[in-house]
Image (cartoon, helix red, strand yellow):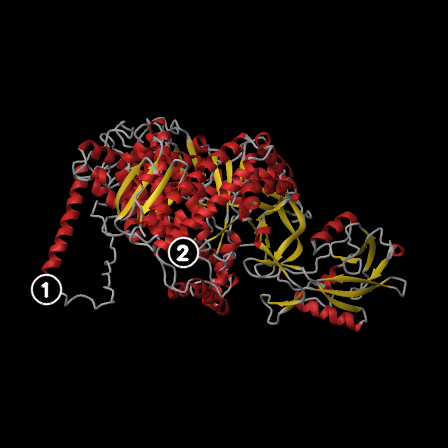
């Protein structure tokens, strides 16, 4: 930026502003091309006759433009070719990104001392997308919002750093690679072996990281690619090891045999985020991976346990009959009188010889649910687990890792698959006469693995855990103290609710892809050790450190060291992202300059799973909250409000919106994924319903603008309609055509003023548009500061469309005609230039490509060498451009114009429009008179506009509308309407006006009116009465004038 002292990014020769003479040459070339085209058309055979003309009623087909071919060498600046007839996003978006990157615009600008610029820094760690596949439209929203902020802060003179990267996504990536392996070759990871399988995953990672990188470039993400990070690269892996060892050494990580979510298909523990609960309306048969027949869910099975030493039986209810093989208690409510006599007694297990099961009293039992007696299986149910801990019950695991029953289930059931055993248990209960009934259980939730579709089993596993209590308490304390801002407010409320009820975090995963736990089991010769006990393990940042610690533990006895086969939860590495990407645990210049970071922007749905862990680990490991602000954006859904899902066919690749794709192309993409044939068919039907003609080509700028336009400061969901995106492509076309026309008004001799400060010679409409530009700049800065992207886009859109294009560009036409004076023309041109220059800058954070393309075509002010709009100053409110009086005056003029347009449209008059304005105030009448040319210019088909002092001077045969007690608008309709019908219409309006007058006078003459009505209301009523009286007088005059015409 020209007004900031800094170490500039080096620009190669020719990278600066395009000289004015080059612009002029381009314009001349364009004019010559048009002239040559016309001459060629005239010279063509048959050009002067009608033989070649289309038949009557037949539309001439517009010649299709040839497909755009980018001829700019990568990294070079695009030349200033003649502007195309219309906006072509593919052509506009070509070459710029490579040039921006080549120029180093995306790197943080630093002072000569390698410090952030005086304005400060703005740093965002980009939420790393999973390398499981390509980006979807939700990622597009992330890019649109974050890049808008980064570009805005960069233009405000801050050192900006946006760090790109990728997440290895342990379970998700392993799952998709396993599916692809099975689909392509019918093999499993076990057929390949661990090392060979991990090599396959690296191949997948490289392919999809490259694909995602390409998508991010297409989206215009101005990230610093030189700092690209991957959660499993050497630097991040070193950070993960340090994280584990530090937490282990501080006693925060511990080992425990606890209940976890277990997926029998993937053979691993899952986090809560990887589990989806499917709620059932009642009895239902569901498909479960690995089972040919569907499995029954949504029912309560009632059966009886014989009470020891008695003929009495105790009936219990369960949704999972097979788990009765692991029961270790029956619980009843302590105040339930039905079971008081059974407290302390035992039931006998019908299948497990010698197992006596105690009847216990616990207040967690809901007396009204089921039978009031609850079977307790502590090793396979979360609530039962807590009961088991309270009553010191035995924890019996009945499941193997693959979902078959183990020896604890008894020889009768050992080896059976869990859902086969469900049937067998019921059959055996029936044989023993213990089966009672089966009932519908509406509202039952079935936990499913998001990756495999398997039904999750709660089961006991020795795992590594993080004690989160103290970490969460400190995070909450820092947030409440103001160190961390979370928006919107509902996300902040969720933050406190989650953190206040936080549970310890299981970080072990039984996978092959991921960071292997840097912890080693020490097997000491001659000593019994237990791998479930913490004391049997040592950590090491290196193998040598682990061996040293093991030697000390062994006390001179021989030992072997075995590294844990498990890998760490993905969130354990991504939780370090804001500082590991800056080089932690090393003390780097980036850590010194850019940590803590400024903002973490992400979806509200992972506020707890990711953001909370970053905050807890950041405080623990660095002593600082890793970012100052958390911004939670909305969830992108389809136009019908449905969550996007591959099986529904509504997942949208942002590149498909950018460049367009046919329905057949969408169908073909489905065949490249892991969906089975049935799912493909369903998804194709969904695509056909939503995109019968495919997705139209919209361009990056339109997509980004649309996504931001959907994003208010409090939104939770975005129902994305691609047609709305297409609407903003038309807005881009409007920008293109308006700028193209405006450049024609900036003739070859035009040189902008040295600054954008008004000269004092501007006309009213110029001062009006500069004031509107000032308002737009203030609104946009305020909106972006408050993260209200919807409001910011509205301000930019309204300025360009409704103020610059609809008003000023039209109003300035007579000021730039040959008949206008040089001063008038020069002033109008400079005002137009300022609006184009600053208007494009206002739009740039949202629409980087089209704004650069158009901005590069503008001439530069003297001594302005800014090479790109990317680093141009963002407009701000300036007192010199504040003209509130002129704004108010021209708003009156514009209201008159709109009323005249409305009357002309109402009466269907499209040419020779004659308008008359009655303004009783002499000063305002003079102002209107001075704007007569503007009024004519802004009213389509207008022949004349005259300002009068009294309604009696209005010609006979005019239709009228009253704007205020002093101002009315009249349109000459004589000879173009049925006089009697017009008189009847006016008389009807007159009757309505008199009724309003009577009603208002009645209200104003009430005895207590002056004492009870507030002063502002009385003033408003007084002005309203004057306006009604003026309307009545005008209508009466109109009736008289039309009557004279009869």
521 lies above or below 1008? below
Q: In the depicted view, which residue is nearer to us: 850 or 479?
A: 850
Q: In this view, does 331 lie above or below 305?
A: above
Q: Which mark is residue 45?
A: 1
Q: In what element is the residue under mark 1? A: loop
- Residues 273 and 704: in front is 704
> Of the residues under marks 2 and 1, which one precedes in the sequence?
1
Name the quarter where the N terminus is drawn. Answer: top left
Q: Would residue 370 appear left or right of 821 to someone viewing this image?
A: right
Q: Position of residue 547 (x, y in %)?
A: 56, 42
Distance (Cα) linking label 2 and label 1: 43 Å
Task: Give me the residue at 56% from left, 31% from top.
Answer: 1014
Question: With respect to residue 814, does 446 lie above or below?
Answer: below
User: Could you say which quadrant of the image residue 480 lies in?
Assistant: top right
Answer with the quarter of the image where residue 199 lies. bottom left
Asked whether, in this view, residue 25 is left or right of residue 15, the answer is: left
Residue nearest the viewer, comparing 33 with 776 = 776
- Left or right of 239? Residue 735 is left
Circle 2: element type: helix
The residue singled out by tag 2 in the image is: 723
Does the rendering let one see residue 810?
Answer: no
Q: Residue 349 lies in what quarter of the image? A: bottom right
Please name the residue shown 45% across and 66% down the image.
684
Whether residue 442 is visible, yes or no, is: yes
Q: Position of residue 788 (x, y in %)?
A: 46, 40
């Amino acid at each position: 930026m020209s007004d900031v002292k800094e170490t500039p990014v080096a620009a190669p020769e020719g990278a600066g502003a395009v000289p004015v003479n080059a612009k002029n040459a381009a314009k001349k070339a364009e004019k010559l091309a048009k002239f040559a085209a016309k001459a060629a058309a005239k010279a063509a055979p048959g050009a002067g006759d009608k033989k070649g003309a289309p038949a009557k009623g037949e539309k001439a087909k517009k010649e299709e433009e040839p497909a755009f071919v980018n001829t700019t060498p990568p990294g070079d600046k695009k030349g200033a070719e003649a502007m195309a007839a219309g906006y072509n996003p593919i052509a506009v978006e070509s070459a710029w990104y490579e040039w921006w990157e080549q120029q180093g615009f995306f790197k943080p600008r630093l002072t000569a001392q390698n410090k952030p610029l005086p304005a400060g820094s703005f740093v965002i760690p980009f939420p790393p997308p999973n390398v499981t596949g390509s980006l979807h439209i939700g990622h597009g929203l992330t890019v649109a919002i974050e890049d808008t902020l980064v570009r805005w802060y960069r233009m405000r003179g801050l050192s900006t750093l946006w760090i790109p990267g990728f997440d290895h996504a342990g379970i998700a990536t392993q799952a998709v690679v396993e599916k692809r392996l099975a689909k392509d070759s019918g093999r499993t990871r076990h057929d390949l072996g661990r090392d060979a399988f991990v090599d396959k995953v690296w191949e997948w990672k490289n392919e999809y990281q490259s694909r995602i990188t390409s998508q991010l470039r297409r989206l215009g993400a101005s990230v610093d690619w030189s700092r690209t990070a991957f959660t499993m690269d050497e630097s991040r892996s070193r950070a993960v090891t340090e994280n584990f060892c530090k937490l282990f050494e501080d006693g925060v990580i511990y080992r425990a045999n606890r209940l976890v979510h277990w997926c029998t298909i993937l053979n691993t523990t899952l986090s809560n985020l990887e589990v989806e609960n499917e709620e059932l309306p009642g009895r239902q048969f569901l498909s479960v991976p690995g089972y040919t027949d569907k499995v029954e869910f949504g029912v309560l099975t009632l059966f009886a346990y014989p009470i020891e030493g008695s003929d009495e039986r105790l009936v219990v209810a369960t949704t999972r009959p097979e788990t009765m093989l692991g029961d270790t208690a029956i619980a009843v409510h302590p105040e339930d009188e039905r079971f008081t006599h059974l407290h302390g007694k035992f039931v006998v297990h019908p299948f497990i010889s010698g197992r006596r099961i105690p009847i216990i009293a616990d207040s967690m039992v809901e007396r009204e649910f089921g039978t009031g007696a609850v079977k307790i299986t502590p090793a396979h149910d979360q609530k039962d687990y807590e009961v088991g801990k309270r009553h010191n019950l035995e924890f019996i695991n009945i499941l193997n890792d693959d979902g078959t029953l183990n020896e604890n289930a008894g020889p009768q059931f050992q080896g059976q698959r869990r859902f086969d055993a469900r049937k067998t248990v019921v059959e055996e209960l029936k044989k023993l006469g213990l089966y009672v009934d089966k009932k519908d259980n509406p509202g039952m939730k079935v936990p499913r693995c998001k990756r495999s579709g398997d039904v999750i089993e709660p089961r006991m596993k020795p795992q590594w855990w993080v004690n989160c209590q103290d970490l969460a308490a400190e995070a909450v304390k820092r947030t409440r103290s103001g160190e961390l801002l979370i928006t919107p407010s509902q996300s902040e409320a969720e933050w406190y609710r989650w953190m206040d009820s936080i549970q310890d975090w299981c970080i072990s995963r039984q996978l092959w892809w991921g960071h292997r736990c840097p912890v080693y089991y020490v097997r000491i010769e001659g000593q019994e050790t237990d791998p479930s006990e913490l004391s049997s393990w040592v950590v090491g940042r290196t193998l040598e450190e682990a061996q040293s610690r093991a030697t000390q533990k062994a006390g001179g006895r021989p030992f072997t060291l075995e590294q844990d086969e498990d890998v760490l939860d993905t969130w354990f590495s991504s939780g370090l992202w804001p500082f590991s990407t800056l080089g932690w645990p090393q003390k780097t210049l980036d850590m010194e300059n850019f940590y803590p970071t400024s903002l973490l922007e992400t979806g509200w749905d992972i506020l707890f799973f990711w953001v909370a862990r970053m905050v807890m680990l950041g405080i623990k490991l660095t002593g600082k909250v890793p970012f100052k602000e958390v911004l939670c954006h909305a969830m992108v859904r389809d136009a019908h409000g449905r969550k996007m899902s591959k099986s529904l066919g509504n997942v949208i690749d942002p590149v498909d919106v950018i460049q367009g794709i046919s329905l057949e192309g969408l169908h073909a993409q489905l065949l490249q994924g892991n969906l089975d044939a049935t799912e493909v068919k369903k998804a194709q039907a969904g695509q056909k319903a939503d995109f019968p003609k495919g997705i139209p080509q919209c361009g990056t700028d339109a997509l980004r603008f649309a996504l931001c336009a959907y994003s208010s400061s409090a939104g939770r969901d975005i129902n994305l309609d691609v047609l709305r995106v297409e609407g903003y492509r038309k807005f881009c076309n409007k920008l293109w055509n308006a700028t193209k026309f405006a450049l024609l008004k900036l003739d070859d001799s035009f040189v902008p003023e040295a600054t954008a400060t008004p000269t004092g010679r501007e006309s009213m409409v110029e001062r009006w548009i500069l004031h509107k530009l000032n308002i737009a700049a203030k609104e946009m800065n305020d909106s972006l500061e408050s993260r209200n992207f919807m409001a910011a886009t509205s301000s930019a859109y309204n300025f360009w469309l409704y103020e610059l294009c609809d008003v000023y560009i039209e109003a300035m036409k007579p000021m730039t005609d040959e008949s206008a004076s040089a001063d008038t023309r020069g002033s109008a041109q400079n005002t137009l230039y300022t609006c184009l220059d600053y208007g494009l800058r206002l739009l740039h954070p949202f629409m980087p490509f089209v704004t650069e393309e158009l901005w590069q075509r503008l001439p530069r002010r003297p001594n302005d060498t800014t090479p790109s709009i990317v680093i141009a100053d963002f407009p701000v409110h300036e007192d010199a451009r504040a003209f509130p009086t002129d704004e108010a005056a021209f708003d009156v003029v514009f209201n008159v114009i709109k009323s005249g347009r409305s009357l002309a449209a109402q009466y269907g008059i499209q040419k020779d429009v004659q308008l008359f304005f009655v303004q009783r105030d002499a000063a305002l009448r003079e102002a209107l008179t001075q704007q007569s040319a503007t009024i004519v210019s802004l009213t389509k088909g207008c022949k004349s506009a005259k300002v009068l002092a009294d309604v009696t001077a209005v010609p006979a045969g005019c239709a009228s509308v009253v704007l205020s007690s002093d101002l009315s608008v009249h349109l000459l309709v004589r000879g173009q309407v049925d006089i009697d019908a017009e008189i009847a219409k006016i008389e009807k309006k007159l009757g309505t006006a008199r009724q309003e007058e009577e009603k208002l006078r009645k209200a104003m003459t009430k005895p207590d009116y002056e004492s009870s009505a507030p002063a502002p209301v009385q003033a408003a009523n007084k002005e309203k009465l004057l306006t009604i009286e003026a309307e009545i007088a005008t209508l009466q005059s109109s009736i008289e004038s039309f009557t004279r015409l009869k």
